[in-house]
Image (spheres, grey):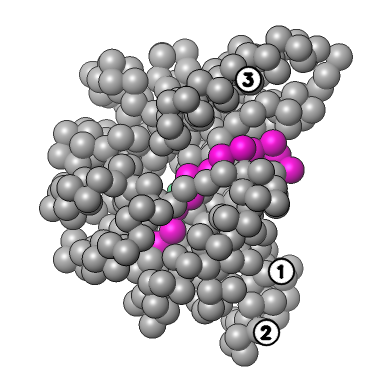
Amino acid sequence: MSDLPTFVQGLPKAELHLHIEGSLEPELMFELARRNRLDLPFRSVEEVRAAYAFGNLQDFLDIYYQGAGVLRTEEDFKDLALAYFRRVAADGCRHVELFFDPQTHTDRGIPFAVVADGLLAGMAEAETSLGVGSGLILCYLRHLDEDAAFPPLRMAEPYLDRILGVGLDSSEVGHPPSKFARVFRASRERGLKLVAHAGEEGPPEYVWEALDVLGVDRIDHGNRALEDPKLVERLVADGMTLTVCPLSNLKLCVVDDLAEHPLKRMLGLGLKATLNSDDPAYFGGYLGRNWIATADALGLTKAELVTLAKNSFTGSFLPPETVQARLAEIDAYASSSAYSQ
Ligand code: ADE
Ligand code: ZN
């Protein structure tokens, strides 16, 4: 008999919703502050962790942008990425499509190349030393003007062969996807995939706009789509992937209790949901913890866990032959595992 943590650890899976700046652990925050001779408004790691009590998305974003201020050099970004990859390699993660927020760094004078080169160096090392592959998704900050999203797209030009796509993150309510129609069109014209946070705190209309105005390939979160049966029907018909983040939803009060999380309901409706960590250093768990805590709270079956693992690859931007190989590995693993639930 294999237990749930053992089964989950061995299950091949991908992470499709991860903000690399959200993997900055307080220990590394202090180390980078020391290395870069910066003062932090906290005296200890414990004090930082005690500040991680959020009533909503904005409470979190305020502290998240402040934390990112310790990231200054290429080496900092590489160390940040590698620390994250070591954690998820231990969780049995094989592939990550990670978000980064260039404007958070360029707006405080850090060159785009420092951020991108540092992250790409960490990603390359993770592939060779840990066997975790990855791709980068450049996110536009939606609380800023659409005009402010064009410079990062321009700065990304020399990196287009190493960037999978663009996304839309930060404060959702009051900043609908349609505000970014032009920059998403320009991004698509450059051959980039498109994703957007929608329906985390914002209404179902934002999910409709992400689909119909931006033409996204994937929806990040999407929880509030469940309020609109026609939208659910559309998402199912399109086979649209939702990158769902249960521990994030709990920490940001999108749900009051993990046992009330809609993930199982989404699967039951035929939605192509995946399980992800969002900002693991802030929300109490990396990929493995999200899988185990959610499976426990919702009583996810072995078949549902297998579906989630398969969705994480079929919803990825990996080449079709790699996806097929991972699906075969998942089937082989599931049929050979003694885990039954
Ligand atoms: N940036 C980092 N995490 C985010 C989230 N969960 N929603 C929107 N923007 C984010
Ligand atoms: Zn997110």
Q: Residue at x 63, y 57 (%)?
A: 125
Say above or below: 64 vs 288. Answer: below
Which circle's residue, 1 or 2, is located before the other in the chain? 1
| Quadrant position of the C terminus in the picture | top right
Q: Position of residue 268 (x, y in %)?
A: 47, 13
Q: Is residue 5 left or right of residue 160?
A: right
Is residue 261 visible to the viewer in this orientation of the structure? yes
Q: Secondary structure at mark 2?
A: helix
Q: Quadrant of residue 215?
A: top left
Is residue 223 visible to the viewer in this orientation of the structure? no
Q: Is label 3 or label 2 in front?
A: 3
Q: Is residue 240 left or right of residue 316?
A: left
Which circle's residue, 3 or 2, is located before the other in the chain? 2
Amino acid under disc 2: Arg
Residue that badge 2 annotates: 34
| Quadrant position of the N terminus in the picture | top right
Q: Is residue 30 left or right of residue 187?
A: right
Residue that badge 1 annotates: 27
Disc 3 to disc 1, how far (Cα)?
35 Å
The magenta stretch spans which residues?
90-101
